[in-house]
Image (cartoon, rainbow, N blue to C red):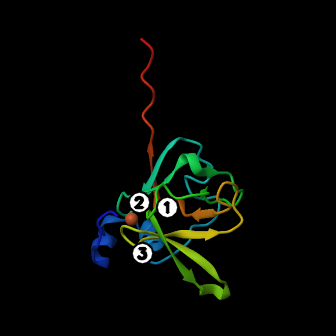
Amino acid sequence: MAEKVRKSEEEWRRELTPEQYQILREKGTERAFTGKHADAKDSGMYRCAGCGAELFSSDTKFDSGTGWPSFYAPAGEGAVETEDDRSWLMRRTEVLCASCGGHLGHVFEDGPNPTGLRYCINSCALELEPDEDPAPEA
Ligand code: FE
């Protein structure tokens, strides 16, 4: 398990954009279809916008039609943590970055095979590290 990233709220405020801060640290939600990764098809590793931890591989990304990037599994065991979320008169399962505790989104049980899970994640909480292009042919 990676080392935990701990920073003061002041440090987070300084390092994150206001939008990232609102989502990662204040559990906000970006408006559907506004995030840059919602329809992205690029292959690579989605890392935490707060701490850089590997969170989701593009291999598990699918088109959920919700307007938020959706994945059926995290990048590795222990990459994310979940917590019961009873805000807004709903019962949901919150998804957090296991390394920095940043709020990422929620997970629902209506996803595709092989897990049946749908990790519904804010674009703003993710930074895509694209796969290296294959070497051009000589
Ligand atoms: Fe993180």
What is the CA distance from the residue labelled 2 to the residue labelled 1? 7 Å
What is the CA distance from the residue labelled 3 to the residue labelled 2? 11 Å
User: In the rendered structure, which amino acid carries the disc numbered 1?
Assistant: Cys
What is the CA distance from the residue labelled 1 to the residue labelled 3? 12 Å
Q: Quadrant of residue 41?
A: top right
Where does residue 115 sit, x and y in percent of width and height? 64, 59
Where does residue 114 sit, x and y in percent of width and height? 66, 54
- For the residue pair 10 and 46, the one nearer the viewer reads as 46
- Tell me the element at label 3: loop
- Which quarter of the rendering shows the C terminus? top left
Q: Earlier in the sequence, mark 2 or mark 1?
A: 2
Q: Quadrant of residue 14?
A: bottom left
Apparent side of residue 100 relative to residue 26 in the rendered image (left or right):
left
User: In the rendered structure, which amino acid carries the disc numbered 2?
Assistant: Ala
User: How many residues crowd mark 3 within 10 Å: few (<14), some (14–19), many (20+)?
Assistant: some
- Which quarter of the rendering shows the N terminus? bottom left
- For the residue pair 113 and 5, the one nearer the viewer reads as 113
- Tell me the element at label 1: helix
Mark sitting on residue 25? 3
Which residue, given by chain and number where applicable, does mark 2 sit on? 49
